[in-house]
Structures are given as C-alpha cells and as structure tokens.
Image (spheres, rainbow, N blue to C red):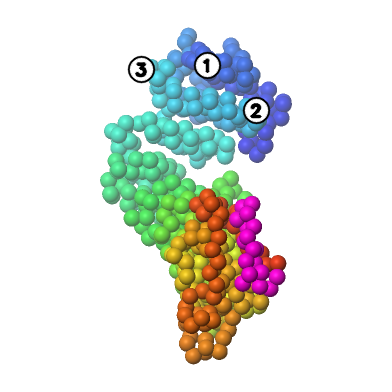
Amino acid sequence: ALSSSSAPSNATLSQLRAVLSVLLTPGLSPDIDEICETRLGTSPSPSTVGFASALATTIYHHDHPSHAWSISAKVSADRVLAIVSVLRTLSLTEELSHDCQTVITFYSTSLAHVVGASYQAPDVAYLATQWFDSSNDVRQAAKSLFDAGIVRLSDEECIALVDAWQHHLPCLQPSIEKESAKSSLALFICGYMAAEKYSLLSTSSLIDISKSIALYLHDESSAHRSLAIDLCARGFQIWQHYIDAMAVLRALYTLATNSRKETISAQNIGPQARLAVLQIASSNTPLFMTTLTLDILNPKTLDQRKSVMQLVAFMIRKRPLILYPNLPRLMEAVVKSLDPNSTASRDAVLDSATEIIGHVVKTFPTVDFHMATQRLAVGTSEGAFIMYDLKTATQLYVLEGHKRRPAACTFSPDGRRLVTMSLEEGVVLVWKVGSSFTSFFNPGAPPRQGHGGSSPFKTLNFNVGDEANMTITGTLEWVKFEWPAERTVRLHIRESVLTFST
C-alpha cells in the first residue's frame, strides 16, 4: 500500500526502489537510466513483470525494452500506472522529488517517441476505471496519466471516444442506473474530454455532460459528488452555458462551508469544494460576485446566508485580490444584511457579518470601521468613499475628493475625522465626518467641511517617488495608518513614514 501522507521511511524506500527496479524498462533513454540508477537508487533487475486479470495471470518476456510497451494498451496502462504511483510516493522524500518528476514526465509523455510505431499507448478508458477503483495515491497517478492520454489523442480519436461513452451519461439513464459504475465512468471520460477539448463536442453532448455534473452535485446521497466538484473546477466556464450556473455555485458554496461531521471518506469533499470555488471565482468573477451578493441579501434560508458569509471570510483570506475591485458591492450587501427592521435575520448573521467586516478592515486598507459610532467607510476604485451607518444599515453619504484610485483610509480615534489617501495622486484628504446639526436638514449629504463647499476639510500633498506606482498587492502589505494623537496621523508607505495634522 502506498501512502501520500508523509515521506517514506528508509525501509519503505528500499522496498520502493526494489519494486521500481522491476517496473522500469532501462535502455530507452540513457539520461533517464542515469537518473534512476545514480539518483533514485534503482538497479537493473532480472525479475519479470506479470499482469493479472480475473481469469488469468500472464508473464511477458521481452528481449528489448521497447517490447514491454508494444504488448497492448491495457498492459501499457497497468505498467505506467504502477511506475508513476511508486515514483509519486518516492517523491515525498524531498531530495528525490525533482528527479522523480523528471522520470514521471518521461514515462507519461515521451514513450511514443522513443518506442516508435509499435508503441501501444495506455488505454485511457482503463486508466479512468482506476480513478474509481484504487487508493487515493493511485487515483492521482491515474488522473494525471488520463490527462496526458487525452492530450495525445487525435481529434478523430477524441470524438470516437466520446461517441462510445456519451450514451451512458447519468442524466440519460433510468434512476436505478444513474449511480452505476458505467454511468460514472462515462461522465469521467466525457467530462474531462470536454474540459480539455470542448470545441470537438456537439452541443447536445455538452448539455448531457453538464446536466450529469449537476445531477451528481445536487444529489446528497451520490457517491460521485467528488467527480462532479472536480469537473466544476475544471470546466465551469463550459458547463455554465447549459445548466443553472447559480444553482451549481450555491451547491458548491454549501459544500465548501459545510461543518457537519460526516462519514470519513477517501473523497474529502469540503476542501475539494473550496478549491473549486476559488477556481471559479478566479475564472468567472462577475458571476461569482453576483451570486455571492444576491445570496447575502436574499437567501432562501438563514443557514444559506451564514454559509455565504463564511465563504466570503474564506475568500478574503485566500484570494483577496479577487474581492478587491468588488469590495463596495460586497460591503453594501453585508451592511444591508444587518437591517434592524428584520430582527431575526440580523441576529442570525450578526456574528458572521462582524467577522467579515473585521477580516475586510484588517486585509484592505481602503476600508475602515469605527466601533463607537458604528460607521463604516468603503473606498471605490473611482476615488469616492462611501459612508455607512451599521446601526441603521444605511448609506449615509458619499465623499468625492480623489480623482484616482485610493490606497487607504482611517477614522480618527474619536470618529470625527476620516483621512483618505491616494498614492497615485500623492495626496491625503481629511474629512469631517462627525454628526452635525445641518445633517438633520440635508440627509444624504456629507457634513459641512468648514468652508462652505463639498471639498475636503484639508488637502495635504506628499511625494514618495516610485512608490506612487505601488501595485494593489503592495498596498495591502505596505500601506497603513496609525494615530499617535487625537488629531495627528502617521502614514506608513513601506519604509517611509509621513506625519499629518488633521
């Protein structure tokens, strides 16, 4: 049994080297032979590899190493799967990792070239069955070899393979057959083929594949949800045109944040769903954000809203740059979810919303929250800052002073000043934001700034040279404010420290 949980012991290493020595076919590449013998510690073996089936065991003798790869597609698949599985386990030893990967690449992609016309390429359908029937370590090896195999197939071979399997797709089967081995295998083969070469497939094939993925994903009792999740991660941009994309995203959100202790399975669905969500968020940010904000504002259940809130916190930690341009939209949804007129709803999400606001303020310098006044300031890429009152869950007003993207903001300790800054402009703006008498007569307008107009109370210019071109990633790490006194603020820009009176 192979284990991918930790580096193998010395005794296990010796066993792996002995097995690998029997499986390898030295003589095909001097460079690979040298790596295997001098770095991986294998040695030529007189032993012969046998192949077993339900009915028989066969031992093949070959006079030349290329003959080992010229017997049949299934024998080639069995042998290369065994080689790659052993090498993947050996690679857990750090000093062997690079060389193992080199040998894996050779046996996965170069045999057709070195063996020649007699080469029997590994049977991709057989490799797919191993994904279902093997341990997790062999599953991973089978999947990587399957991927390499379908890349190698000609367009005609790809079409023929899909034609042979698409009629077995789960959505086309009676209920009793939807979970069958043949149906799940059909989805594996057709699904990954479509993700890699979708332009070769007909619209009807893509519809059936997409429906089958959704079928497994939405079925809580399905043994093949892991397959559906992985296919969502691999080809969501394809499937979204043929099924309810938002429903699929919502199912992934739920699986990604599900904290129920379920039966331990080789297919760990929670982390897998989180990876799928990250992938989809990166490749289809508009749909991701639309679904996210809709579900915060109009969830079907309170549990769904809490689940989405947890997902937002996860995204802030893992992919802050995806959320950055969408922060105003996201924070508006979080604020509205705290509507005091809906007491039950507010109470249910208060902890999650508070956690999100805390994560956002800590991660993004363009957002700040003042606890005592319950005011939230959110910067936009156009240069404006939106002021919210969390007690009433309403937008108070918009401060428009910057002409370029802002980089940070901060409330004064007493909450009566908001300082905003744009690196691109080289300017700090100071705003009066405390409650004023005139606010009662002109709701929605910012407080008077002391000079009769809507311009900032103070405009303070600075020059930090090339730091003005700092990336967004850089501003998240290197820009911050601090208040040494009630009306004195320090601006840190990497190594520079600027002090302003507010």
Q: Nearer the viewer, residue 283 or 10?
A: 283
Gap between marks 3 and 2 measured at Cα: 36 Å
Q: Residue at x 65, y 30 (%)?
A: 93
Task: State the image quarter where residue 410 is shown.
Answer: bottom right
- Kind of residue at badge 3: Ala
Residue bearing the label numbered 3: 117
Q: Mark 1 packing: few (<14 Cα in 10 Å), some, or many (20+)?
A: few
Residue bearing the label numbered 2: 95
Q: Residue at x 57, y 19 (%)?
A: 35
Gap between marks 1 and 2 measured at Cα: 18 Å
- Kind of residue at badge 1: Asp
Q: Earlier in the sequence, mark 1 or mark 2?
A: 1
Q: Residue at x 48, y 9 (%)?
A: 63
Up-down: is 440 above or below 219?
below
Residue 59 pos. (x, y %): 51, 17
Position of 280 with respect to 365 (left or right) is: left
Write down the region rendered in magenta. 485-502
Q: Earlier in the sequence, mark 1 or mark 3?
A: 1
Q: Mark 2 packing: few (<14 Cα in 10 Å), some, or many (20+)?
A: few
Residue 286 seen in this snapshot: yes
492 is within the stretch colored magenta? yes
Up-down: is 382 above or below 47?
below
Up-down: is 120 above or below 411?
above
Tag shown at residue 31: 1
Dot 3 and dot 2 residues touching (CB under 8 Å): no
